[in-house]
């Protein structure tokens, strides 16, 4: 649906404003924006830490702390991606489902717990204070359980559940499982719970990583893409797309659980079978995404440009991962498939960055300008950010991610890792500044911080 707007007194077609969603059900603007801003903070720290790791690897600086790579993974995937997911679900589940958020107060509480938990976990890793890991892990788990309860109760009020809502409910279940395994792993640092007589730590780590990345994160990403790509390309899934979506909806959860179970029990055959289903599902979603982008009836935007990168990334990751998981799905260096960078940046990262390039301006626009539509000139959503900066940060992040992926290849020069880390950091800084400027300039005085409360349930 297209809704008219006015810019400089002239009616303009605003095709990027969906007309069939219920924005009256959404929580206050500050709730999701606080999640996004804190998430951007963790992303910047993750990018800086990645540069430090690359510098350390070249031997030109003092060694980074021993758990720095683990801290980087948690900053990137938990601090940025999962915190952004929590904010996005809190905002858009009520919008998509047409039901009120179960509790606005819990949405505020979840952010405090998640932010404190990630900060404590990363600080303990970098400082070598392993005794603090169970405490920080418990806080983080409580934050995810609060999020799961709040959004889960909201989703259960929606009937019937569509493909996006079914993915989200499944992802919430994965979040609960992941946090339980995470607490066990944190306790194992000080209590030695894992070993030959129970489950070896390496096997528990493999299951934890699988449920976290492929279960909680990718299930959420896939569910959101079915909604967002049709909404913002102004297209509908055709018969082939619906068949592919049905295939992924059935096959992907089976693959994730089989891959996690195989890694937990060191069963190569089960893990390999699950891995093949996961690879097929990622490739399937990549095809659906590429087809919708090709059929788009709207001009290219930063959101759709980054989705195009993600579609290519999904295909590339699937092709590169297939032989590795056929050969050794239990290998530690294959736990993310081809590589962490190819999955976390190209498959997940560009979907999240692209979504934020629309969601942040969209949330601000709805709260600041929607009521003025038709009464006075208002800007379009894509006018709220600086398009030239968006182009530069896309080039920087894509080039940086490509260098990081290439740095894993045999005989790759050592400087490629540092160059990729630096370029990705530059892109992250530009993207963060561009979107935070939207909040500062157009947020009508609502600057999201961790201070303050959200009124009313």
Image (spheres, helix red, strand yellow):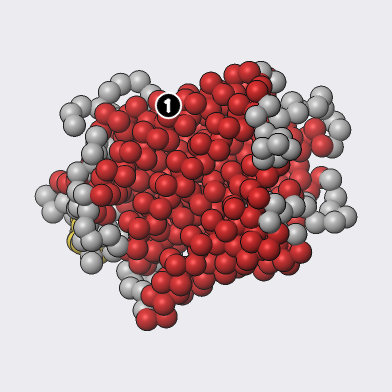
Q: Quadrant of residue 150?
A: top left
Dot 1: within a 10 Å radius of its alpha carbon, few (fewer than 14), some, or many (20 or more) residues?
many
Residue 210 position, x and y percent, is: 59, 50
Q: Quadrant of residue 224?
A: bottom left
Going 55% across and 62% down the picture, which residue do you hit?
A: 255
Going 75% across and 56% down the picture, which residue do you hit?
A: 406
Q: Quadrant of residue 424?
A: top right
Q: From what the image shows, is residue 428 above or below residue 117? A: below
Residue under pointer 1? 113
Q: Which quarter of the rendering shows the C terminus?
A: top left
Q: Is residue 241 visible?
A: no
Q: Which quarter of the rendering shows the N terminus?
A: bottom left
From this viewpoint, which residue is outermost toward the bottom?
Answer: 239
Residue 298 in the figure: left or right of residue 348: left
Residue 223 position, x and y percent, is: 40, 58
Q: From what the image shows, is residue 182 above or below residue 99? A: above
Residue 367 position, x and y percent, is: 23, 41
- Of residues 60 and 184, the one drawn nearer to the viewer in this rendering: 184
Q: From what the image shows, is residue 230 above or below residue 376? A: below
Residue 44 position, x and y percent, is: 57, 35
Q: Is residue 195 visible?
A: yes
Residue 104 in the figure: left or right of residue 239: left
From this viewpoint, which residue is outermost toward the left?
Answer: 375
Q: From what the image shows, is residue 176 above or below residue 155? A: above
Going 26% across and 54% down the picture, which residue do you hit?
A: 96
- Of residues 206 and 96, the one drawn nearer to the viewer in this rendering: 206
């Amino acid at each position: 649906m297209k809704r008219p707007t006015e810019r400089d007194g002239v009616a303009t077609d605003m095709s990027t404003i969906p007309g069939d969603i219920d924005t009256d059900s959404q929580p206050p603007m500050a709730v999701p924006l606080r999640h996004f801003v804190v998430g951007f903070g963790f992303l910047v720290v993750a990018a800086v830490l990645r540069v430090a790791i690359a510098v350390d690897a070249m031997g030109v600086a003092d060694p980074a702390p021993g758990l720095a790579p683990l801290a980087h993974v948690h900053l990137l995937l938990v601090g940025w991606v999962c915190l952004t997911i929590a904010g996005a679900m809190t905002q858009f589940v009520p919008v998509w489902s047409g039901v009120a958020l179960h509790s606005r107060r819990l949405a505020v509480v979840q952010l405090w717990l998640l932010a404190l938990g990630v900060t404590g976990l990363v600080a303990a890793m970098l400082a070598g204070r392993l005794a603090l890991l169970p405490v920080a892990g418990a806080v983080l788990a409580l934050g995810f359980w609060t999020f799961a309860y709040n959004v889960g109760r909201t989703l259960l009020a929606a009937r019937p559940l569509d493909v996006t809502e079914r993915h989200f409910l499944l992802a919430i279940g994965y979040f609960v499982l992941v946090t339980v395994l995470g607490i066990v792993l944190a306790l194992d640092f000080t209590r030695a719970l894992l070993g030959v007589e129970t489950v070896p730590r390496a096997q528990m780590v493999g299951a934890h990583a699988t449920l976290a990345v492929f279960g909680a994160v990718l299930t959420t990403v896939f569910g959101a893409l079915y909604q967002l790509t049709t909404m913002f390309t102004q297209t509908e899934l055709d018969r082939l797309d619906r068949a592919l979506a049905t295939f992924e909806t059935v096959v992907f959860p089976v693959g994730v659980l089989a891959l996690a179970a195989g890694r937990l029990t060191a069963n190569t055959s089960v893990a390999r079978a699950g891995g093949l289903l996961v690879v097929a599902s990622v490739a399937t979603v990549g095809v659906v995404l590429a087809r919708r982008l090709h059929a788009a009836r709207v001009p290219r935007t930063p959101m759709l440009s980054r989705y195009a990168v993600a579609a290519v990334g999904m295909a590339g990751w699937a092709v590169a991962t297939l032989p590795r998981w056929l050969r050794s799905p239990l290998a530690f260096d294959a736990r993310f498939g081809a590589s962490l960078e190819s999955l976390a940046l190209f498959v997940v990262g560009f979907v999240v960055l692209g979504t934020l390039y629309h969601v942040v301006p969209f949330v601000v626009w709805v709260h600041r300008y929607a009521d003025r539509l038709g009464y006075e000139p208002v800007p379009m959503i894509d006018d709220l950010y600086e398009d030239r900066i968006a182009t530069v940060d896309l080039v920087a992040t894509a080039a940086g991610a490509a260098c990081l992926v290439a740095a894993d290849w045999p005989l790759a020069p050592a400087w490629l890792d540092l160059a990729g880390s630096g370029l990705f950091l530059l892109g992250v800084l530009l993207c963060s500044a561009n979107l935070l400027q939207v909040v500062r300039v157009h947020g009508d005085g609502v600057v999201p911080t961790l201070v303050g409360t959200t009124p009313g349930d």
